[in-house]
Amino acid sequence: MEMLLQIEKKYRQEGEFDEEWETLKKNLACPLILRGHKSGVFAVAFSTDGASIVSGSTDHTVRVWDAKTGDCQQRLREHIGSVSSIAVSRDGAMIVSGSDDKTARLWDARRRSRTLKGHFNRVCAVAISPDGAMIVSGSVDRTVRVWNKKAGDCERVLQGHTNTVNSIAFSPEGATIVSGSGDETVRVWNATTGDCERVLQGHTNSVRSVAISSDGATIVSGSHDKTLRMWNAKTGACERTLQGHSDMVLSVAISPDGATIASGSMDHTVRIWDAKTGACLKTLNGHTTWVRSVAISPDGQTVASGSDDGTIRLWDIQTGLPVMI
């Protein structure tokens, strides 16, 4: 990549940035694959401006990558267990990571960390409220914990799930928390009171991932039953079941405009779905084993996928092809 950038700089300086350069670039182009983690990538997230990708891995590290070049900009090493979940604040100043070491960590803009302790087992999920004031975490201990970001205190413990809390998401206005669990349910919680407002039932196996549309109207869940489900966030009704994966669904994401859904599966693929019709638009092949995490860029043009093969791949949503460098 560095060589390609140097050649581009030379062409620009010499005023020969023309068809010759475009031909050379095309011949030198290769898929943008982020390599550096020593083992599986369990979590990926875009920064709000789309300039960075943050990942968490079973190698116990958090990495920050340049989304354009694929260069690793930072490696954060404080956890003593696998990093299974990542969240980035809207202002980009804070990263939160959840780990098998039973903790969540807050990393500030200078990448100094604070530890949130309270869970009695592995932390599988983390999320940050839209205003950045609140952090939530989900754990194998079956609870959701709500933390005050400023003080680092646990303000509330949400109980109701009867199995591992695998995934958590905030509604766009921050009033609602959604969690997915190994008990096969999705729960909707009042973020202020901690009350469980509804339980969404329909999956026939563990719910591994949840996401909420930017307008707050739709909840998407992915499950070990190999399906995705789309739920009406207000009524809790299941409006559509998306079928196509040949193995367990491990991660889901919704594009900012709500038109597209991405999913990652144990079948080694990423799938792109039409949120309106439920049709599978594209199947993205490239990873050599389970796809643990997917994220969609803020402009809705790119999907990032993290896999047990230790890599992060970037895909063009419109074409279904790898992003090239």
Image: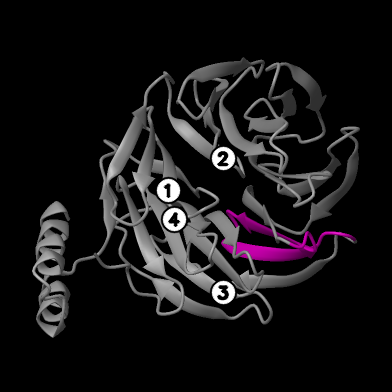
Alpha-carbon distance for marks 2 and 4?
22 Å
Query: What numbered label is drawn on residue 273?
Result: 3
Q: Position of residue 84 (x, y in %)?
A: 49, 36
Label 2 packing within 10 angstroms: few (<14), some (14-19), many (20+): many
Question: Which region of the structure is painted magenta?
Answer: 215-234
Answer with mark 2 or mark 3, whichever residue precedes in sequence.
2
SS under mark 1: strand
Give whichever of discs 4 and 1 has the lower sequence position.
Answer: 1
Reading the chain from its start, which is encountered first: label 3 or label 1? 1
Q: Earlier in the sequence, mark 2 or mark 4?
A: 2
2 and 3 marks in contact (CB < 8 Å): no
Contact between labelled residues 3 and 4, with CB atoms less than 8 Å apart: no
The answer to whether residue 219 is magenta is yes
Type of secondary structure dominating the magenta stretch: strand
Q: Nearer the viewer, residue 156 or 202?
A: 156
Q: Which secondary structure, mark 2?
A: strand
Which corner quadrant holds the C terminus?
bottom left
